Image (tube, rainbow, N blue to C red):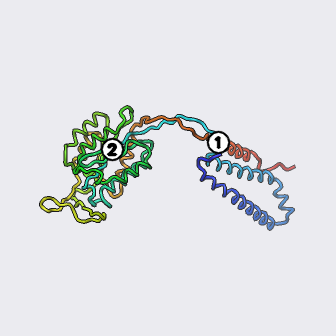
Amino acid sequence: MTFGEPRFLYALLLVPLTALFTRRATIRLRAALAELGRPALIARLSQSVNHRGRRRQTGLWFAAVTLLIVALARPQWGREVQMVEQQGLEVMVALDVSQSMLAEDLKPNRLSRAKLEIADLMERLAGDEMGLVVFSGAGFIQFPLTSDFATARSFLDSANPGIISQPGTSINGAIKTALTGFNWQRASQKVIIIMTDGENHQTDPLPAARQAAKQGAIIYTIGFGSTQGAPIPQYNAQGEVAGYKKDKQGETVLSRLDEVTLQEIALAADGQYWRAGAAGKEVAALAADLATMQKSTLQSRFETRHVERFQGFLLAALALLVIGEIIPDRRPIR
């Protein structure tokens, strides 16, 4: 026998403790009654009480509680083969790993904050599949659609500006790459989530967003950074900040959040834009929005599962409680 929720079995420890407490309370009650008057008088006054019936009621109550606890622990034995259907959405996250995402106007920096939000989103996706596109001047699929988020997190952690040699930011290319990651043979809703500061240095992303909408994909955008801008740190071989990126005139480059572009992308593909904040409320809002979408079958598979047997324990507990209520509290006096 196995148990689906074995932690509930710890509650069985409370049963003998409660029985001991009940026993001591009964002894104290008898002692208190003995002090009220003569034993013969007390016995005469309480002769209609069904003491044996009350003891049986108490025993049935403890047995029923024990069975209820076992039922909560979900006892299982035997096996059966079942067809399991995984229903959900197909979600491709496009993560900007350009140098500007290292700006520290979000702590610890924009890129690290975006990774935390992706990990948070994984925790909120129930039955959905997620894939990851990393991009800067170019882009590629870091991991394909999967529901194995434990493995996916290791790939997410390795996403950094060094994995793509081509500088710049191509949101247009990121959308096109994300579209190739979907399984178009499925009827499931396709969703692209773009996490970036919005600084697009290459082709206009709006035509790609409109094309995605025509194919049935919805695009959400989350902007990281501030509109005031922040310098882009440069690191030495030891991983320490050695300075900040400068332009040809020697001026420090400020990377600014381009909210207008991200709003236009989301609007073009029937999605929504959020600005990343310190509390991370945008992830909760995004997950709530995704939960309202109609989910389709992603895959079907056969699984061998233990057979649940809690029903018998539950019925037995209810039967004992009913029997206990039938026992009369008083007995007739002749």
Identify the residue shown where x is 37% and y is 45%: 143
Relative to 99, residue 139 above or below: above
Residue corresponding to mark 2: 141
Of residue 180 and residue 198, the one placed in the foreground of this image is 180
Along the viewing direction, whichever of 229 and 67 lies nearer the viewer: 229
Residue drawn at point x = 77 percent, y = 51 percent: 56
- Give the secondary structure at mark 2: strand
Q: Which residue occupies the foreground of this view, 60 or 290? A: 290
Secondary structure type for disc 1: strand
Quarter residue 294 falls in: top left
Please tell me the numbered disc located at residue 77.
1
With 317 as the anchor, is 283 left or right in this view?
left
Q: As shown in the figure, which amino acid type bears the numbered disc 1? A: Trp
Image coordinates of residue 192 in percent, x first then y, are 32, 42
- Amino acid under label 2? Ile
Identity of the residue furthest to the left in this view: 249
Q: Residues within 10 Å of mark 1 (few under 14, many from 20)?
A: few
**Which quarter of the picture shows residue 185?**
top left
Quadrant of the image occupied by residue 182: top left
Q: Position of residue 305 (x, y in %)?
A: 58, 40
Residue, x 39% and y 35% (percent of image)? 188
Vertical comparison of 293 with 98: above or below: above
